[in-house]
């Protein structure tokens, strides 16, 4: 049974979400109202998904809480937001949420978002897992990309990728030599073509900053990305 933690200080909303999820067969491990309650419940129950209010009790920043939880374990993340939270939503993208639920929420939007996250979020469902690629920079240098563990391994060094960074790199390596459109990438990584171009560019910037070979991923202006550097899949 999939476990869900609700971090929401408005108990009426939190109880409503819990009732909807439990009626669908999910296990709600608890309702947290502030930073410490959220951390305590998370470490105790290791949930598969966290439904996080972007603003918690006493003005606690839900984005800050989510960023802290990302250091503690792997989970899908959905934010609860109010209309007018545009600035916070932009900040929240840094914590790699699967999606957002805008209050007032309904049974349909809760279940649709949670169910889709459980099936597709790379933090709980690693696409391209067990795929390992050998990427050749030049005749003297190569490194391994392990899409399951999320590590780049080069010269006895390991560079950690987030699940979304790993998913993006694995997807482009799987499409080696092909130009992959921005729209197709957004559909693959977020399961939503309407995700902003800024979200994709930010994810790409973070990924490139970690790569031993910064020009591994070529930008095709106005269209998409591709990898042409020699790359060989050595396990799948």
Image (cartoon, rainbow, N blue to C red):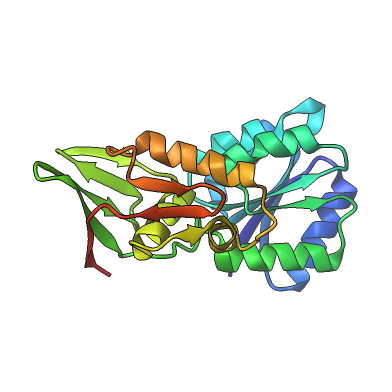
Rendering quarter of residue 223: bottom right
Where in the figure is residue 34, as x and y percent of width and height?
Answer: 72, 34
Front residue of 171 and 177: 177
Residue 56 visible in rendering: no
Front residue of 76 and 2: 76
Quarter in which the C terminus is drawn:
bottom left
- At 87% across and 50% down in the image, what residue appears? 103
In the rendered view, would you say 136 is above or below 133?
Answer: above
Left or right, 57 with reference to 177: right
Left or right, 223 with reference to 56: left
- At 42% across and 61% down in the image, what residue appears? 171
Where in the figure is residue 117, as x and y percent of width and height?
Answer: 62, 62
Rendering quarter of residue 111: bottom right
Left or right, 148 with reference to 188: left
Front residue of 222 and 62: 222
Where in the figure is residue 23, as x and y percent of width and height?
Answer: 77, 72
Where in the figure is residue 121, as x and y percent of width and height?
Answer: 56, 60
Rendering quarter of residue 38: top right
Front residue of 221 and 65: 221
- At 61% across and 63% down in the image, what residue appears? 191
Quarter in which the N terminus is drawn:
bottom right
- At 65% across and 67% down in the image, what residue appears? 116
């Amino acid at each position: 049974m999939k476990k869900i933690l609700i971090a929401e200080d408005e108990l009426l909303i939190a109880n409503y979400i819990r009732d909807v999820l439990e009626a669908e067969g999910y296990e709600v491990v608890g309702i947290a109202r502030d930073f410490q309650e959220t951390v305590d419940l998370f470490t105790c129950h290791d949930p598969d998904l966290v439904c996080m209010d972007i603003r918690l009790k006493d003005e606690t920043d839900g984005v800050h809480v989510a960023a802290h939880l990302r250091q503690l374990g792997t989970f899908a993340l959905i934010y609860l937001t109010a209309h007018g939270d545009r600035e916070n939503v932009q900040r929240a993208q840094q914590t790699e949420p699967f999606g957002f639920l805008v209050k007032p929420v309904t049974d349909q939007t809760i279940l649709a978002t949670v169910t889709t996250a459980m099936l597709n979020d790379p933090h709980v469902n690693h696409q391209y897992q067990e795929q390992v690629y050998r990427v050749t920079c030049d005749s003297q240098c190569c490194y391994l990309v392990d899409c399951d563990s999320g590590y780049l391994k080069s010269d006895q060094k390991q560079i950690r990728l987030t699940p979304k960074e790993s998913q993006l790199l694995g997807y482009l390596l799987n499409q080696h030599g092909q130009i992959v459109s921005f729209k197709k990438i957004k559909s693959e990584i977020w399961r939503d073509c309407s995700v902003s171009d800024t979200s994709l560019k930010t994810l790409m910037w973070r990924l490139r900053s970690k790569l031993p070979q910064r020009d591994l991923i070529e930008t095709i202006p106005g269209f998409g990305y591709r990898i042409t550097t020699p790359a060989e899949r050595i396990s799948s």
